Amino acid sequence: MAAMLVYKCDACKKKISDARKSVSAGVGYHKHELCLKCGAPIVRILKKYKLTK
């Protein structure tokens, strides 16, 4: 039986159904998974300074 990985938003504790609908934020050991709603401000700042790929 295969194991299923379940992601939850670290801010609002909402279950993230698809990994493509999440934002991974952090550096090194401290990484946080955020849903798109909670991660929107981070994405906005990264796009403003053109730090995304």
Image (cartoon, rainbow, N blue to C red):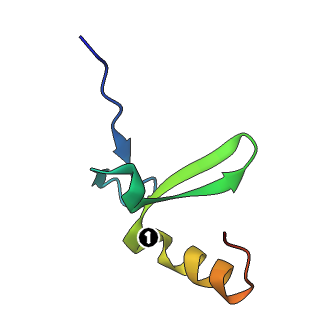
Q: Is residue 31 left or right of residue 49?
A: left
Between 48 and 35, the one nearer to me in the picture: 48
Please report the residue visible at 67 percent of the width from the left and 72 percent of the height from the top.
Answer: 52
**Relative to residue 2, is residue 20 drawn left or right?**
right
Where in the figure is residue 22, as x and y percent of width and height?
43, 59
Q: Residue at x 34, y 53 (%)?
A: 13
- In the image, taking residue 38 as reference, residue 4 lies left or right, namely left
Residue drawn at (75%, 85%) of the image: 49
Tell me the quadrant of the picture where the N terminus can be found: top left
Left or right of 53? Residue 49 is: right
Quadrant holding the C terminus: bottom right
**From this viewpoint, which residue is outermost toward the top?**
1
Vertical relation: 15 (above or below) 6: below
Asked if 2 appears above or below 13 in the picture, the reply is above
Mark 1 secondary-structure assignment: helix
Residue that lies at the very extreme toward the left in this rendered image: 1
Q: Nearer the viewer, residue 28 or 13?
A: 28
Which residue is label 1 attached to?
38
**Label 1 is placed on what type of residue?**
Cys
Q: Position of residue 2 (x, y in %)?
A: 28, 16
Q: Considering depth in this image, is 43 or 13 the residue closer to the camera?
A: 43
What residue is shown at x 33% (from left), y 37% (from top)? 6
Q: Relative to 38, say whether 2 is above or below.
A: above
From the top left corner, tell me how far across and down residue 48 is, in percent. 68, 89
